[in-house]
Image: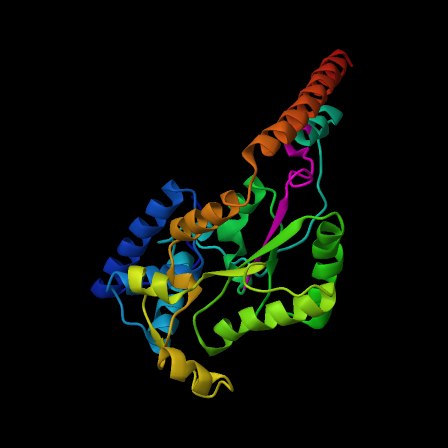
Amino acid sequence: MSCEQYIAKSFSKHNSQLIDYMNDLIEDYQRQGYVLTVRQLYYQLVARDVIENTLQSYKRTANLINDAKLAGHMDWDAIEDRTREFLTNPHWDAGSSILRSAAQSYGQDMWANQETRVFVVIEKEALIGVLTGTCRKWDVPILAARGYPSGSVLRGFAEEHLLPALYVGQRVRVLHLGDHDPSGIDMTRDLIERLSLFTRHEMDDSDLDRIALTMDQIDEIKPPENPAKSTDSRFAAYRRQYGTSSWELDALSPQYLNDLLEGHIEDNVDLGAWAEKSAEVDAVRNDLRHLARSQEEKEARS
């Protein structure tokens, strides 16, 4: 916990109760292994009818979270900003330490002996951290598209990941997650068209599967809705099909998103081939752990 007080600030009874409610909500998600962004926390409050779903409400909530952290009423580490991080070099206190770390992190391409190779593309960079654990578990690359990705980003994705898989006869399966709004829906079409261009392979929804957000999920979960942006050039086509409401991916709980993603990944995995690869990885990790123990003994004698 990191609740150091930097400023002295008093809160109204209503805001104090809201801070307490947010802290309880944060702790509940932490027990599940998740750290929320401000936007995710906001949507959890909206979904529980604690606050209204408006731009002003979001700004008030974000400001209250910031003030609560500064005043020592909220854990700084409980809310994550996944878009701004310092990049630092790794450091080690001994040779045995890096060997143990190497043993822990050693891995092979778990999809090399699979018939299908899976990738994840998510519209929002802020949600990368929510899905990182599942993607690491299944050795699945994940791309934060940040809306419509540039041609250079998609060409690099095609050349570094999709084409090598296609060349060796693997089927590619791109799982796409985005907002349900005029641009978010159109991004799926755009990805299919431009990845088809860069791979020279006619991709369709069997190659690129939009797994969220869908109307079926919206009907099931009933996340908070927002008015679709009428200034979006795709608004008219969207309105004809879906109406004037839109929904954000952030409104889905981290557990729901991970369960959804893991289910789609597992649908494409040959578990027998996966077990063979896992055994190879474990054998190398055991060798590295043996080297680490030998190095530790040498360091203890010196």
Magenta stretch, residue numbers: 103-122
Outermost residue to the left: 13
Residue 77 higher or lower than 216, as above or below? above
Asked whether 288 falls inside the magenta stretch, the response is no
Residue 3 in view (yes/no): no
Q: 32 or 302: nearer the eye?
A: 32
Assign the C terminus to one quadrant of the image. top right
Q: In the rendered view, does 61 fall on the left or right side of 158?
A: left
Assign the N terminus to one quadrant of the image. top left
Residue 281 position, x and y percent, is: 66, 28
Asked whether 117 falls inside the magenta stretch, the response is yes
Q: 29 or 282: nearer the eye?
A: 282
The structure's colour scheme is rainbow
Q: In the rendered view, does 287 fall on the left or right side of 19?
A: right
Q: Residue at x 62, y 29 (%)?
A: 278
Q: In the rendered view, does 219 fall on the left or right side of 153?
A: left
Q: Residue at x 43, y 70 (%)?
A: 180
